Image (spheres, grey):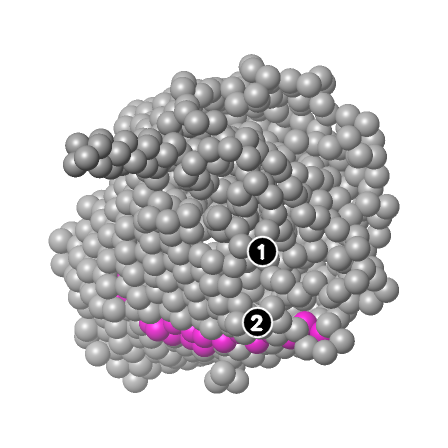
Amino acid sequence: MMMKRILFTLCLGTCAMAMSAQSTTISGELVDSLTHETEPFATIRIFKSKISEKPAYMLVADENGKFSQVVQGSGQYVITFNSVGRKEIVRRLKLSSDNNSVLNLGTLLVQDDPKQLAGVTVTAQKPLVKMETDKMTYDVQNDVDAKANTVLDMLRKVPMVTVDGQDNISVNGSGSFKVYVDGKPNVMFSANPSQIFKSMPASSVKSIEVVTNPGAKYDAEGVGGVLNIIMNKVGGQTQKMNGYNGNVSFTGTNYGWRGNAFFSGQQGKLTYSINGMYNYMTSKNVETIMDRVSKDGSSMHYYQKGKTNIPFAMGNLSLNYEIDSVSNIGASVGMTKYNMKSTGHPTTTFSGGIYGSGFSYGNEMMMNMGNTSINTSVDYQRFLNKERTSNITLSYLFTTSPGINENARTYDPLSPDVHLSLNDLYSKADTRGTEHTFQADYTTPVGKGHTFNAGLKFIGRRNTSDSRYYDIINGLQTFNTENSVNYKNKQSILASYVEYTLTAGKFGAKVGTRYEYTWENVDFVLGRGADFKKNYGNLVPSASITYNIAPAVNIGVTYGMRISRPGITFLNPYIDRSNPTILSYGNPDLAVEKSHNVGLVFNAFTPKFMMNLTLAENFADNQIEQYSFLDNNGVLNTTYGNIVRSRWTNFSTFMNYAITPKTRIMLNAAVDYGDIRSEQIGQRNHGWQATAFLGLQQTLPWNIKFSIFTGGMTKKYTLQGHGNSFNMITSTVAKSFFKDKLDVSVMFLSPLTGKMRHNQYSSGLDFTQSTQILVPVKQIGVTVTWNFGNTKKQFQQHQSKITNDFQERKDNNQMGVGTGVGM
């Protein structure tokens, strides 16, 4: 009898173990049926046999619309997918008795539910940020402030991006970063991102991607990473739906006006889009105060009240044609044009030291900076398998960017006690950058969860700078050969990369390497610079590892090496003499800057709350830095050198909490500690700096959208000093009419201190200098937008497959304020 009981118990245990061993992993992803955008945070229920009140399993899709659930047992099951305002998806499944089987439901298409949309007011909020280990995407179009604000305003909210009081932008803690528009570079954007983004309406941008750890597929240029601006584009395959849509908008403020128009559509296999905008802003009564004290006791005081006009225009035409089911071709042409003209009447006073009892003088000044950028691209893509997971892409990109920089100075009648040699002058620099880029990329899976990428690229760049200096004597311009420079720079770059991506259960990894070889020639047609040639290669590794702690929680480790090639502004030895007390020039002996970044990333998200925490260490031993020193004549010289050893530790966080379906708060904050030192000039600086912005978005009665956003940053350290701290507050009220065809927004912006104050302090071994710029920026504006079309879909426009990051490093002065300092 005892033996029977033992056998019976063993039999039950064996059956139980067999039953527990029978498990199936059910996975898939949810996307919108029209736009093919991911459907995040859908509620998923799994029932045994039939739908009942209590599901056997319940989960939520992640921010990419993907889901995975292990189900124990076999037999008949029912799985349902629900999102607010969407039709319920129901799938009936039969799970086999095979141990540890996998069932991939593939891509499930989600559709709007007209009954739900007509019967209720949908107040659920779509997450604003999509977080990955090495990239974050900010959904501009779902931010209520996008209807009234500029792209620069939106950047203050984007994780890993900071915008200081002078509108200078930093990405991942660095001012050296690259800007893409729809995945392709724009010379104009990279050279002057602050000025461009301050002129662009946020309504023209769909999303902003911040790639903090670009992989091997990205070019090695850009210490801070890549800022990719996605313009009115949707991803996924083109749908067979003929139609069109678009909008026109107008913004009026107390500083100027802006107009914008967008139109897109599809006819059969052809999709197209056109986007154009014009912006005209004026900044008046900008005050600049500068004080400098030299080692010998002499001092300088400078004061100016100026005016700046900034017209800006941008246009883009994009076409895409689906040749057949496995291949497509696309083309685009875009133009960006801006001018910044500043005028004023500064006064300068010298006293003490070598200047004795001192003297003063005044002058009329004019500065005009202009640039036109033209970008064209053609791309051909062919899929190599029916699953469309293997493809080859061939791309060509052409850009040209002619520019002008004019300076004029006319002195008031000079008194006999003026000890400086001051002459009326006019200078004009004509610059042009031209690039041809050829690229081939290959992507293919090499097994389940394994992907291989490889590619080749060649870029040919030609830069010219013809800087002419004229002395004005008795009202006549006389060409000054000694102070003029005609400079040509040729650069050819050949690059190749390989990259491997692995997904295995809860682990994900990406590792790759890139090699870039550069040939560079510099020729001086006119000027005292010496011709030179140099060739160099750079091997750039990168890696990232991600672990999914839970379906909505992951942690990752990243490593990336980045380089920064000095641009023509940094290399050009032309001496800018437009300011007789400050001489500025480049350094043709600069080498490529190399930096390393290691990061620890934590992401957690639910339908209501999301959080990113990033701890990173960035270090470089040959950082390019601008520095100043006094010459024997007491004139301040400013140039560049590979003179800095830097170490930066950074902690940043982004949090977004939907308290209710109508209330959302967000926090974007960072704190850094840096150590910057240079043995070459015997100086060191170190300290803490922080940034914090807090925002509230509220849906009021009658579906009025209200938001308020405030914050600021502490002073920012450089080798020889520090930049200013600043603070600001902005608020927006928006309402839609006529079934969302008409949008009206009112925006208010102001610093908490009344005027925006830009303070800059620097010191050398023989001088100290402080600069204060006061900018009246209290602004109120009204934006009116009319939306039209015969379908809600926003059609896909051509996106260049070239991810060209070879734009050279530019001057960190991104001309955000346009004070027009001219002594």
**720 lies above or below 44:** below
Does 720 appear in magenta? yes
Q: Which mark is residue 554?
A: none
Q: Earlier in the sequence, mark 2 or mark 1?
A: 1
Give SS at disc 1: loop
Residue in front for this viewpoint, 445 or 819:
445
Q: Amino acid at mark 2?
A: Thr
708 over 280 or under it: above or below = below
Give the CA separation, mark 2 to mark 1: 26 Å
Q: Residue 622: x percent and y percent?
A: 22, 45
* Quadrant showing the N terminus: top left
Give the extent of the magenta segment: 704-727
Asked if residue 471 is among those painted magenta in the image, a careful observer would answer no
Q: Is residue 463 visible?
A: no
The residue depicted at 56 percent of the width and 64 percent of the height is: 153
Number of dots carrying numbers: 2
Q: Secondary structure at mark 2?
A: strand
